[in-house]
Image (spheres, grey):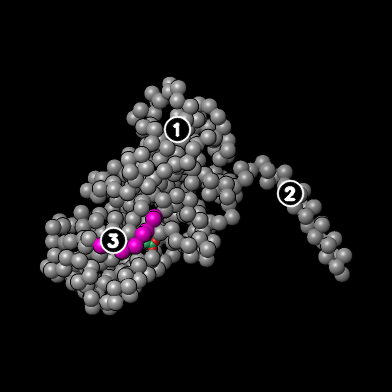
């Protein structure tokens, strides 16, 4: 019996080996192969958050998350328009990725241990170092979250915000009543109509929500940022090559900003003698090959979408949100690219 099992095992291994040459002709990434065969990257976004992902008047998805999706499409296809945006909710975003419905998730999603350890997902990069905040009406006459004992707080279910608020209240020995509302328009209306004293989520979204209100001066973002919410690019575990592609695409945008390469000067930079710039732009070395991509993968991202700072300014600075810790490390921020060599 044992012999039979061993034999079956050997046969199985042999048949897998026999199949290996066909697999070797692929890129080594099932996700990359599927994306290329389909001709389009399917990227999960929120589709409703100004500055992150929101269709403009022409129906074109705009925002930092949308452009993060475009970065990967530009790296893979040399064409950032080859993205299909899939609208996901705070509650279905992880199953959409696990089931293979989407290739990549960039949806103001916080990198946490349990999301990697329990959900079979990996965070390949952080496009916004954020934190949970509270938005209140000035009429409430509150200046600090510490004055919010007994408050009702509107929060979306399935978010890391829920845990951040309960931790904060526990630490400060205060009580609150959560009002859980999934739909974004509904939660914002609940807050505006006074159903809750505060609206809590990532402070970026609170700031951009406030900035887009006609009576924005009636609202106050409380000074406390009560948690760390690094928002990022998320992929499934088990496809290391795809993880590499997404991770180094993000790093390429940061490296470009660090080196002063942007969408406007990138063609002039093709004449640069700086070895780091030459490798980044695919003029020497084999970085593209290492990722199973074209040698111009990073050039295409920078030329067609922009470096990290350009993407930030286009989507976030315009809403009046300061760069802060989201600057590159050479300017005192947290975005730092390891060597592209
Ligand atoms: N970063 C937190 C919160 C995510 C979250 O609630 N995002 C909000 C604000 S940016 C959102 O996307 N709302 C839009 C929607 O649900 O349509 C998490 O990963 O759980």
**Local crowd size for mark 3, using a 10 Å CA cut-off: few (<14), some (14–19), many (≥20):** some
Mark found first going from the N terminus, 1 or 2 = 2
Residue 235 visible in the current orientation: yes
What segment carries the magenta color?
224-231
> Decide: marks 2, 3 in contact (CB < 8 A)?
no
Q: Quadrant of ligand 1?
A: bottom left
| Residue identifier under label 3 | 225
Rendered position, 220 above or below 66: below
Residue located at (77% from left, 48% from top) = 18
Residue 156 point in image, percent of width and height: 33, 68
Distance of mark 1 from mark 3, alpha carbons? 37 Å
Residue on which the image places disc 2: 19
Magenta stretch secondary structure, dominant: loop
Q: Nearer the viewer, mark 1 or mark 3?
A: 3
Q: Position of residue 210 (x, y in %)?
A: 21, 57
Q: Which residue is mark 1?
A: 299
Vertical arrangement, residue 177 with respect to residue 210, above or below: below
Question: What is the crowding at mark 2: few (fewer than 14 residues within 10 Å), some, or many (at least 20)?
Answer: few
Residue 98 relative to residue 139: left or right: right
Occupied quadrant, residue 4: bottom right
Where is 297 relative to 283, above or below?
Answer: below
Q: Of helix, strand and loop, which one carries label 3?
A: loop
């Amino acid at each position: 019996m044992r012999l039979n099992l061993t034999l079956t095992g050997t046969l199985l291994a042999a048949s897998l080996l026999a199949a290996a040459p066909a697999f070797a002709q692929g890129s080594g990434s099932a996700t990359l192969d599927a994306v290329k065969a389909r001709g389009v990257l399917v990227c999960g976004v929120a589709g409703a958050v100004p500055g992150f992902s929101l269709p403009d008047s022409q129906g074109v998805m705009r925002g930092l998350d949308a452009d993060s999706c475009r970065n990967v499409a530009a790296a893979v296809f040399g064409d950032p328009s080859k993205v299909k945006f899939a609208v996901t909710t705070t509650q279905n975003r992880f199953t959409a990725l696990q089931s293979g419905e989407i290739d990549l998730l960039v949806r103001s999603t916080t990198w946490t241990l349990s999301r990697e350890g329990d959900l079979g997902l990996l965070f390949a990069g952080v496009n916004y170092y954020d934190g949970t905040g509270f938005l209140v009406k000035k009429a409430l006459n509150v200046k600090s979250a510490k004055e919010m004992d007994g408050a009702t707080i509107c929060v979306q279910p399935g978010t890391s915000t829920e845990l951040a608020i309960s931790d904060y209240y526990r630490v400060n020995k205060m009580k609150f009543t959560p009002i859980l509302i999934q739909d974004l328009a509904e939660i914002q209306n609940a807050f505006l109509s006074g159903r809750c004293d505060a609206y809590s989520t990532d402070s970026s979204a609170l700031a951009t929500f406030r900035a887009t209100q006609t009576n924005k001066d009636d609202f106050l973002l409380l000074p406390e940022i009560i948690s760390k919410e690094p928002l990022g690019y998320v992929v499934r575990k088990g496809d290391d090559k795809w993880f590499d592609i997404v991770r180094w695409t993000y790093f390429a945008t940061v490296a470009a900003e660090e080196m002063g390469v942007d969408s406007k000067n990138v063609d002039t930079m093709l004449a640069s003698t700086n070895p780091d710039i030459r490798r980044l732009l695919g003029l020497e070395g084999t970085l593209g090959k290492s990722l199973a991509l074209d040698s111009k993968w990073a050039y295409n991202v920078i030329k067609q979408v922009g470096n990290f700072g350009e993407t930030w300014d286009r989507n976030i600075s315009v809403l009046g949100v300061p760069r802060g810790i989201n600057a590159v490390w050479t300017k005192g921020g947290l975005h730092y690219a390891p060597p592209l060599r």
